[in-house]
Amino acid sequence: MTNVITDYLPSDTDRFFCYAWYDKLRSNETKFGDRWVFAGIDPTTSCKQRIREQAQTRKDLVDDGSYRMVAIWDVSDIAKEANRFHKHGKIDDYIRKDIGFVKQSEVHSLAWTDLKLRVDAIVSKSTQIN
């Protein structure tokens, strides 16, 4: 996967992250999901693993760069404010309503750059420290 936009390092506490990725053949659709990251685990690696899991039988598309992770966000504070700071807290669904342009389930009818701008704005409005 290329174009990863992140500067997060492992932490001594559990955290909740959201991530965005897209398929090169569908550049106007972006997948937005979440990942609980345990203490001591690299968040970027963990989110990449989740994307690879979601690829199911098409892991080759992850491996060859067709599926590109483009951003991750630490949304732990948002999850705490929303009482969703726990594994399977579905913080992505909580944030999704403010992103809009939902095509189906976790896919948005937005280029990844537009989705990133929207999520950046949502995160910056929270008490989340960037």
Image (cartoon, rainbow, N blue to C red):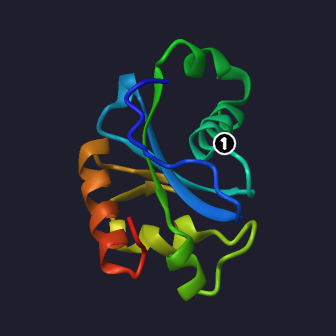
What is the quadrant of residue 54 in the picture? top right
Task: Name the residue located 73 percent from the left edge and 66 percent from the top edge.
Answer: 88
Classed neighbour count for the residue bearing mark 1: other residues with Cα under 10 Å, few (<14), some (14–19), many (≥20): some
Residue drawn at (60%, 47%), measured in percent from left and top? Answer: 43
Secondary structure under tag 1 reads helix
| Amino acid carrying mark 1 in the image | Ser
Q: Where is residue 1 in the image (x, y as percent from the top left)?
A: 49, 24
Q: Is residue 37 left or right of residue 47?
A: right
Q: Give me the residue at 48% from left, 17% from top.
A: 65
Q: How many labels does the image show?
A: 1
Residue 44 location (% of width, % of height): 56, 41
Which residue sits furthest front? 12
Q: Where is residue 89 in the image (x, y as percent from the top left)?
A: 68, 72
Q: In this view, does 63 lie to the left or right of 24?
A: right
Residue, disc 1: 46
Q: In this view, does 105 lie to the left or right of 24?
A: right
Q: Is residue 21 above or below residue 86?
A: above
**Quarter of the image holding residue 86?**
bottom right
Specify the quadrant of the image occupied by residue 37.
bottom right
Q: Residue at x 43, y 45 (%)?
A: 7
| Quarter of the image where the C terminus is located | bottom left
